[in-house]
Amino acid sequence: MHVLVIGAAGMVGVKLTQRLVRDGHLGGRALERLTLVDVVAPQHPAGFSGRIETLAADISDAALAPRLVAARPEIVFHLAAIVSGEAEEDFDKGYRINLDGVRHLFEAIRAEGARAPYMPRVIFTSSIAVFGAPFPDPIPEEFHLTPLTSYGTQKAIGELLLNDYVRRGFFDGLSIRLPTICIRPGRPNKAASGFFSNILREPLVGREAVLPVSDDVRHWHASPRAAVGFLIHAATMDLAPVGPRRALSMPGLSATVGEQIEALRKIAGERAVRLIRREPDETIVRIVSGWARRLDASRAEALGFRAETKFEDIVRVHIEDELGGALPV
């Protein structure tokens, strides 16, 4: 099997690649070839004996997608995007990367299939940012898409494009609406949601973190480990039961910032909690106020998707996967 990962140098892309290499197969078929693409060259995963190509490229370049698709990968993971805060700051860049890059990929697959039969599985990572306030709590499966950010709008358009290309028989695929992924490893980025991870990740290793919103802000979360599980399941499951609506809200855990902090306190103690510095940011407050707090993910759950059910488990996943299983002394 040949797997193409677009956005392979990002946090989820790296973890997905590591999981693929560790498993050595996908959907019962041996993994023989990996193509890893991002705006910076992805690293070669250790321990992979098959053929591998890494490429640094801009997905908004219309010439790139035909080159990638010409190799006819059976599975295409499209993870690449600029994050919510950056898409809000730079309107043109947001649409160039988050929309044009998607359209170029879908069109390249359609053109390749016109030359000779080709039906890959395409997994597009969408976001709960496709929903915008006011909305019910929880947001039901049938709720309309009303994004209130450029990022959410771009993801919603990507979902609709995927539905139409699948309906027309150009490829098979699924859009998965990821919860906010927490705890993200690494350093803070421009994502408006970054503080959800920052207020846990940094204190766990003895560093101060800034909290720009109030403790009563509620949001929908899943761990990086769960996100990789969503992608693997989406790539290998029988899509017939999904039907024509090819966008699924992934399972997650609804928690307030205060509940996050309490989970930190239970696991790392009061000393870690004292490293959180409250510094309100009205821009972040405005963006987050329009985000989903809780979703009905029963459709995805019935199809076999799973996530954490306690926030302490999300913290423990980070400690196991990023800190060697123990907190620093």
Image: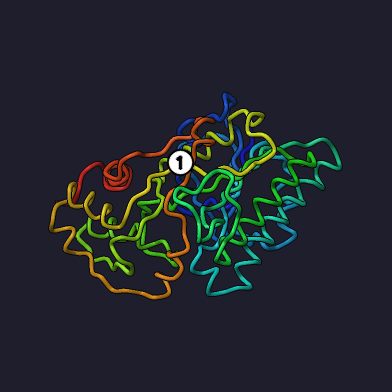
> Is residue 53 visible in the rendered structure shown here?
no
Mark 1 neighbour class, 10 Å CA radius: few under 14, some 14 to 19, many 20 or more: many
Residue 233 in the image, given as x and y percentages of width and height: 53, 33
Residue 205 in the image, given as x and y percentages of width and height: 22, 56
Total residue callouts: 1
In the displayed structure image, the side of residue 258 where residue 225 appears, left or right: right
Q: Residue at x 28, y 46 (%)?
A: 315
Q: Quadrant of residue 253?
A: top left
Residue 310 in the image, given as x and y percentages of width and height: 30, 41
> Is residue 247 visible in the rendered structure shown here?
yes
In the image as oriented, which residue stretches furthest toward the top?
A: 28
Would you place residue 132 above or below residue 12 in this image? below
Give the camera-side residue of 86 and 129.
129
Q: Residue at x 71, y 57 (%)?
A: 64
Residue 168 in the image, given as x and y percentages of width and height: 80, 42
- Image quadrant holding the N terminus, namely top right
Coloration of the structure image: rainbow
In the displayed structure image, the side of residue 7 where residue 201 appears, left or right: left
Q: Residue at x 63, y 29 (%)?
A: 241
Give the camera-side residue of 117 and 150.
150
Residue annotated with mark 1: 251
Q: Secondary structure at mark 1?
A: loop
In the displayed structure image, the side of residue 49 where residue 3 appears, left or right: right
Q: Residue at x 76, y 41 (%)?
A: 167
In the displayed structure image, the side of residue 280 where residue 40 appears, left or right: right
What amino acid is labelled 1 in the image? Answer: Pro
